Amino acid sequence: MFAFISTNSMRIDTTVKKVPQGSCCGPGYRDIQYNSLLNLNFAKWTGTIAFADFLLIVVKATTVAEVENFTNMEMSQITK
């Protein structure tokens, strides 16, 4: 699996070697967690993508500082 992150000034590419799968709690617990995350009211610059065991939170911004600020805001909401 391949993953990357890019900004206006750089791109970082990596190969994903390990993917966490399976759970001692089973898919029901995962579904409860995903549903609560997917039902949050994220800001317009944030999106979520869920597929199988994967959850991706995407933040769009014009600078690295904005990405950090927006992500911290969303992570604070998730933590609550």
Image: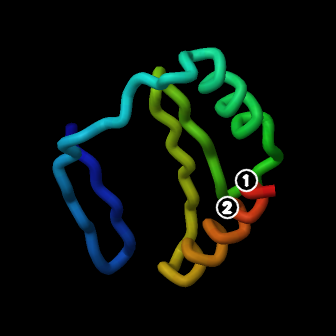
Q: Which mark is residue 75?
A: 2
Q: Which mark is residue 67?
A: none
Asked whether the residues under the numbered discs 2 and 1 touch, taking CB atoms below 8 Å apart as contact, a structural biologist would say yes
Q: Residue at x 60, y 26 (%)?
A: 30
For badge 1, the amino acid type reads Ile
Q: Height in image: 3 above or below 60? A: above
| Residue 49 placement, left or right of 16 | right
Q: Height in image: 78 above or below 48? A: below
The quadrant where residue 44 appears = bottom right
The quadrant where residue 48 appears = top right
Disc 1: CA contacts within 10 A as few (<14), some (14-19) or many (>=20) = few
Q: Position of residue 2 (x, y in %)?
A: 21, 43
The quadrant where residue 50 appears = top right
Q: Position of residue 41 (x, y in %)?
A: 82, 46
Q: Position of residue 66 (x, y in %)?
A: 59, 78
Q: Nearer the viewer, residue 25 or 4?
A: 25
Q: Nearer the viewer, residue 14 or 80?
A: 80
Please identify the residue farthest to the bottom as the structure is shown. 65
Circle 1 sits on which residue? 78
Q: CA distance from mark 2 to mark 1?
A: 5 Å
Q: Residue at x 72, y 68 (%)?
A: 73
